[in-house]
Image (cartoon, rainbow, N blue to C red):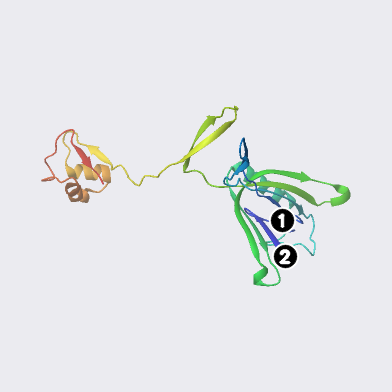
């Protein structure tokens, strides 16, 4: 038994075929004195394609998890996934006769394209949808720089960015007639924090402040 999940969708009839293309970007070079060599690189993102039948009526071989939904639901759900420009989870559960025969596909994907097929002669009122997905890998921590090669092809150089755990402390600049109490009351909303401000700023008392003096608030 196969169960197909795509984002919020559970397809009532599992596709008869599933194509997952595992691409690579290895490069073959021809050396003058050594013949061909193959430079091995990290594999490209997977391409996934399948066709799914959306029934107009209940069939005994279909599984309606959560109840039977109209055809329009699947079209709108796919459209929203594509327009949102966000990744979704693609899961295929293959349930055999025993636990040893169970295995899963569970990857993040983007919805690239989908095609609606209506065929009165062969499908009746049912709807067939051809769906193309692309594996998604989060690269938000990378900076990309476009580089033009000698052949005029634009490629991208990526570098990792480190997230800084440092936070810039909030400060306040003293003006005329300020006291630590008035600063705590106005800036922190609680005059009882006066002693705390005195402590973190290493002040001798809570009154003697200079105009232009910078006070740490946290």
> Which quadrant is the N terminus positioned in?
bottom right
- How many marks do you count on the picture? 2
Q: Residue at the spot x=61%, y=37% of the render?
A: 33
Q: Residue at the spot x=69%, y=61% of the render?
A: 3
Which image quarter: residue 30?
top right
Which numbered tag is attached to residue 122? none
Tell me the crowding category of disc 2: few under 14, some 14 to 19, or many 20 or more residues within 10 angstroms, Cα based: few
Which residue position is annotated with label 2?
A: 1
Q: Looking at this view, is 25 or 70 the one in front?
A: 25
- Give percent across and percent down for residue 119: 84, 47
Q: Residue at the spot x=74%, y=47% of the render?
A: 130
Q: Residue at the spot x=20%, y=42% of the render?
A: 182
Which image quarter: residue 207?
top left
Which residue position is annotated with label 1?
A: 69
Q: Looking at this view, is 42 or 57 the one in front?
A: 42
Whichever of callouts 2 and 1 sits on the residue coming sooner in the sequence is 2
Q: Looking at this view, is 113 or 100 the one in front?
A: 100
- Give percent across and percent down for residue 100: 65, 70
Tell me the crowding category of disc 1: few under 14, some 14 to 19, or many 20 or more residues within 10 angstroms, Cα based: some
- Give percent across and percent down for residue 5: 65, 56
- Up/down of 4 relative to 101, above or below: above
SS at mark 2 in the image: loop
| Horizontal arrangement in the rendering, residue 40 relative to residue 210 (left or right) | right
- Up/down of 13 relative to 203, above or below: below
| Horizontal arrangement in the rendering, residue 2 relative to residue 161 (left or right) | right
């Amino acid at each position: 038994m196969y169960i197909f999940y795509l984002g919020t969708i559970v397809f009532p009839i599992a596709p008869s075929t599933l194509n997952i293309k595992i691409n690579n970007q290895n490069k073959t070079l021809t050396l003058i004195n050594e013949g061909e060599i193959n430079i091995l690189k990290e594999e490209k993102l997977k391409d996934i394609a399948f066709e799914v039948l959306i029934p107009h009526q209940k069939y005994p071989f279909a599984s309606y998890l959560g109840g039977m939904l109209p055809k329009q639901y699947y079209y709108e759900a796919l459209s929203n996934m594509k327009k949102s420009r966000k990744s979704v989870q693609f899961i295929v559960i293959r349930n055999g006769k025993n636990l040893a025969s169970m295995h899963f596909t569970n990857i993040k994907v983007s919805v690239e394209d989908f095609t609606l097929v209506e065929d009165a002669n062969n499908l009746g009122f049912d709807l067939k949808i051809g769906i193309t997905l692309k594996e998604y890998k989060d690269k938000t921590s990378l900076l990309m720089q476009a580089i033009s090669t000698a052949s005029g092809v634009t490629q991208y150089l990526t570098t990792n960015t480190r997230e800084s755990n440092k936070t810039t402390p909030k400060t306040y600049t003293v003006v005329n007639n300020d006291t630590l109490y008035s600063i705590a009351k106005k800036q922190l909303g609680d005059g009882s924090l006066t002693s705390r401000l005195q402590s973190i700023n290493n002040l001798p008392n809570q009154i003697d402040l200079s105009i232009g003096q910078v006070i740490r608030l946290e």
